[in-house]
Amino acid sequence: MFLSKSISFFLHFWVGFLILCIGTLKFNSCVGDTTTGTSGCLERERQALIHFKQGLKDPSNRLSSWVGDDCCRWTGIHCSKKTGHVVKLVLRGSYEIQSSSPVATFSDLEAAVNRSCISGEINPSLLELKYLKHLDLSINCFGGRVIPKFVGSFKNLSYLNLSASGFGGRVPHELGNLSTLGYLDLNDYRYIMVNASGDTSYNSLPTYDLHVNRLDWLFGLSSLQYLDMGSVNLSTATDWLLSINMLPSVLNLHLSSCQLPNISASLPHVNLTSLSTLDLSLNILGPQIPTWVFNNSRLVSLDLGFNDFSYPIPTALGNLCNLQTLNLDGNNFNGEINRFKKSFKGCIKGNLEDLYLEHNGFSGHLPDWLGQFINLKYLSLFRNSLSGPIPPSLGRLSSLRGLYLFENSLSGPIPPPLGRLSSLRELSLSYNSLSGPIPPSLGRLSSLRELSLYSNSLSGPIPPSLGRLSSLRELSLSGNSLSGPIPPSLGRLSSLRELSLSYNSLSGPIPPSLGRLSSLRELSLSYNSLSGPIPPSLGRLSSLKELFLSVNSLFGPIPPSLGRLSSLRKLSLDGNCLSGSIPPSLGNLSSLNTLYLDSNKLNGSIPESLGQLSNLEYLVLTNNSFECVLTEAHFSHLTKLKYLDISSTSLVFNVRSNWTPPFQLTYFIMNDCKLGPQFPPWLQTQKQLSYLSLSNASISDVIPSNFHILLSNITYLDLSSNRLKGSIPLSICQMKDLVYISLSNNQLTHEIPQCLWDLQNLEMVDLENNFLSGGIPSSKSNLSQLTSLHLSKNKLSGELPPSMKSCIGLITLDLGENKFSGRIPKWIGENLTSLMFLILRSNMFKGNIPPQLSLLSELQVLDLSQNHLSGKIPESFGNFSAMAIGNKTKELIYSGARFGHLESIWVLWKGAQYEYSRTLSLVTNINLSNNDLDGEIPEGITRLFGLQSLNLSRNRLTGTIPEYINDLQRIESLDLSWNQLSGAIPHSFSYLTFLSHLNLSHNNFSGRIPSSNQLDTINDSSIYMGNPLLCGPPLLNQCPRDEIFPDSQTLSDGDKEAKDELEIQLFYVSMGPGFAVGFWVVCGILLFNRSWRVAYYNFFDDMGDRLYVAVARKLAKFKKNKGLPSTPKCVVSSRIAWP
């Protein structure tokens, strides 16, 4: 009985014990297993996280999974499998965000960032996570909030990353309590990559002055191995080096852009021998690199970029045997790069993989010893002053992946051995002076992703072998002198994203094979000599975003297939010979931002479908032959349009009077259209207009008095060549931003508003060819910014106001064809020293020409004709230096606030008036005709070697033509007619090789008219008419046969005859001695020099033999043709041995 009870007791005991054990194991399993349990998260820690979440703002719903009982399953939460405690909290954001459209403004960027990152407050409830080892809140938006001090209370924390999260204020010293911390990242640099439809842009974000006053709190971080405080302000932490020197375990130290206080370059007690990575970039620690940097032989990576170092690189650098990455970019190292050879000797050559020396002042030739760094993967020397050839020894760097030598002065050919760099991924040699052909060997670089050779002087064809670069993503050959066709083999580059061949001399058609480049995003072939049609196959480039074919010789229609390029943003086909109409399919390009079709031969109607391009900002269709009526439908959905240029002579703008456009234009150009007769009412809706050009737009209206309200932001206003009436409204003076105004070629009357000169930004004023009256208003304003003033062809009168002295920036002053009177002011020459073009013709100026005008050293055109000027021409006119040397600039473009203006003036040239614009700066001209000038032509004028046209006609000039008139080497037009000049016409006229217009009529010239090849080309008797004492062609007056007309005009007739007789006598007297000397020089040498004598007679023997053989052959051929018997052939030699 007892036994049975005992057995029953033990059975119940062990069963209960087993049940208890099983229950305990099950409970422990639920707590410890964070992946399979149903309630593994500790409740107090779950509540702590809930409170933490409540203080945050999460617009992207990254914390949407933070629901339910098991917090260990929440995003970013990691728990211990043994205890269930939260040990890891990771809420790291992303440097890359997605956007539906490109980020254009900072507000757009800020909005995009705020949509993607976490912000708000960090709740102290996190202190419940007592076992937290890993905390990562990096790349978020805490908006300048201070790092909470309680973060220093996580006793078990080994990893803390608060970088790029927008914290501000002082870094709490309490972080020094984290004795177990091994990784600390407080880097404050914030940037974001915005990915908008495949295009990535890098944008910096604002920081909030995260700073540290001192770093002694680092002493407590005895386990720290990684420290990054980049972009944290340490400018007052003078103990930074001492504090870091006390970290025994630190391996990686990053203090980039910390405004570190400068310290002595040679501190004796710095002992950072455990470091493997040191980054001190973007501080100002120069000019000398601290010597302690090179005491650590364990260094693997060293970044000292942008520190203003200029002293020589220490030779101790060569002892860093483990160094793999060296960055010295952005400093002030200069001089011959070969001088630094000693610094790169030693064991450093064995392991170095990345060498960055760009953005310094290194000069000289690239050294051959760079080819000794056999493990080098990246070599960067761009933005230096290196010259000479690229050494072929670089072809030995078999591990090289990136070679960056752009923006130097390298010359010579690209060495073919570079084609042996089989690992090369990026080759950038742009912005140098490299010449010769592109080596076909580059086609063997099978790993190449980027080939940039633009802006050099490379010539020859594009090698077809480049079509074998199957990994190539970018091929940039623009800005060279490449010729020949585009190789069709480039169509095999299936990975290519950018193909840029613009600004070359390529010819032939665009290969249709380019339509196979399915990954292509940019195709730029502009400014070449390509011909033929645009291949329809380009319509298959589904990824294409930019297509530039401008300024070629392409012809034929625009392929409708281009309307299938749904990703296209920019389409530039301007400057070709394209014909036909614009295909309506272009209206399908929903992403299009820019459309340039100007300067072609397009005709027909502009399709209304273009009005559907809702993303279009720039539309330029000018210089074509369109014939259509533009209606509201053409603009119906152009809500983003900013720039509109549709100038054409056959376009009619027809919209309702109350039409409100959907756009807000900044630039509006509609010249040569039928826009009038009234000013378009819809213009008053355009509140952002800064550039308005309605020249020749058939407007016959008065300028609205409220123009300043309609165009409050205007800087450029061109209403020329219309039929504007009335006066210039005073309201224009309220356009405070106005830089350029042209109201020329209208019917404006009354006076010029005085307030016009109060516009401080005004640079160019053109009011010519109106009916304006009164004088030029005097002004107290400083007009130093004014560069061009055109008031010609009006009814202006009075004297020039002294206030114009302040126009010291004037380049063009055209006051011609008015009624100005008085004397020409001296201050024009004394104050307006920038003048290049001074035109005062057809006025009523009187008195002498002020010699001060000769102070205008830049003057190229001086026209004082048709006035009442008297006195002599100033001798100092020979001081116009610009006319002495000529100007080589092709176009004279004045730069305004946001535009360029091409200057133009009317010049009397070869008897007719011409308007010069694009070649204006090449013109040099003096016109003083139709005045009352007397005296002689000043000799100084002959010093104007670059003068092209000189007109002194219809004055009372006397004397002779200057002796050195032939020094006017560039003269093309010379008019001295209707004066009282006398003497002979100089024979030196024959040296004026550019002369094509000459008028010497109605003077008192005498003697024979000189003859030469150049003068014979302008053989017109009217040139010399009115000179009764002239004779010889082309006049009918014959000169006496015995009369001699020598060049000299300074001797009397008797002196001339005596001089001629003496010259004849000297000629005959010198003949005898000359013959005697010549005879004995030749005969004496033959008599006394045997070798010369033999050579002399052998020469004549050879000549005789050759003559005999030639005659014999001709004779034999003649006899053969006539059937006569030939003589036997023989060889005759008359050569004998002469003693």
Image: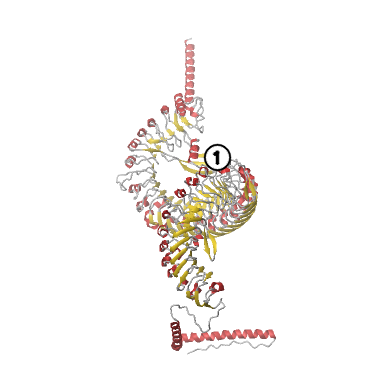
In the visual, does 220 lie left or right of 427? Answer: left
The quarter holding residue 210 reads top left
The image shows residue 628 at horizontal and vertical percentages of 65, 49
The image shows residue 984 at horizontal and vertical percentages of 48, 76
Front-most of 354 and 1109?
1109
Q: Amino acid at mark 1?
A: Ser
Determine if residue 654 is in view: yes
- Indicate how the structure is coloured in the image: secondary structure
Determine if residue 423 is in view: no
Image position of 429 with respect to 1025: above or below: above
Residue density around tag 1, few if under 14, some if 14–19, many if 20 or more, within 10 Å: few
Extreme residue toward the left, this view: 268
In the visual, does 960 lie left or right of 679? Answer: left
Extreme residue toward the top, this view: 1
The image shows residue 1022 at horizontal and vertical percentages of 56, 72
Front-most of 633 and 948?
948
Extreme residue toward the right, this view: 1123
The number of numbered discs placed on residues in the rendered structure image is 1
Write down the residue under mark 1.
100
Image position of 330 with respect to 217: above or below: below
Image position of 6 with respect to 650: above or below: above
The image shows residue 184 at horizontal and vertical percentages of 40, 37
Q: Secondary structure at mark 1?
A: loop
